[in-house]
Amino acid sequence: MIPLIGLLLCVYLAFKGIEIFQIAHSNPEARSSAIIVGVISLASGFIIAAIFAFLFLTSGVQVPSIPPV
């Protein structure tokens, strides 16, 4: 259940990056610095979400193997 919540938070983080980019891009008085911040937040949102998703998916419980008889 915890990895599922973590993956949902990763999706939320990616959507927040898109939202920040859209706010910066839709401003008619936006300077180039606002669009640069939007692009940086979009890229970092996806990169950080991918890293967290990878960490959540690979952090499974280690099951010890049964030694051969």
Image (cartoon, helix red, strand yellow):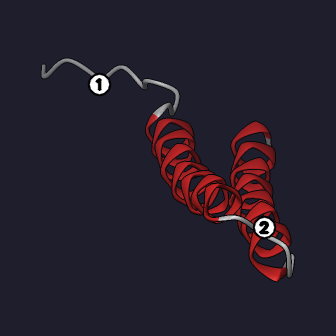
Q: What residue is rendered at 64% in x and 52% in y?
A: 37
Determine the residue located farthest toward the left in the rendered image: 69
The percent position of residue 25, horizontal first and vertical second, equals: 74, 76
Question: Relative to 16, does residue 1 appear above or below in the rendering?
Answer: above
Horizontal side of residue 17 vs 53, given as left or right: right
Count of numbered badges drawn on the protein: 2
Q: Which residue is mark 2?
A: 24
Q: Which quadrant of the figure has residue 8?
A: bottom right
The percent position of residue 47, horizontal first and vertical second, equals: 48, 50
The percent position of residue 11, horizontal first and vertical second, equals: 72, 61
Horizontal side of residue 51 vs 25, given as left or right: left
What type is the residue that disc 2 sits on? Ala
Q: What residue is rendered at 13% in x and 19% in y?
A: 69
Q: Nearer the viewer, residue 43 or 31?
A: 31
- Secondary structure type for disc 1: loop
Question: Relative to 67, does residue 30 appear above or below in the rendering?
Answer: below
Q: What residue is rendered at 86% in x and 82% in y?
A: 28
2 and 1 marks in contact (CB < 8 Å) = no
What type is the residue that disc 1 sits on? Ser
- Secondary structure type for disc 2: helix
Report crowding for label 2: few under 14, some 14 to 19, many 20 or more residues within 10 A (C-alpha): many
Q: Nearer the viewer, residue 59 or 27?
A: 27
Q: CA distance from mark 2 to mark 1?
A: 52 Å
Q: Which quadrant of the figure has residue 17?
A: bottom right
The percent position of residue 32, horizontal first and vertical second, equals: 61, 64
Q: What residue is rendered at 81% in x and 46% in y?
A: 5
Q: Which residue is mark 1?
A: 65
Q: Counting residues from the N terminus, which is met first, the one under dot 2 or under dot 1?
A: 2
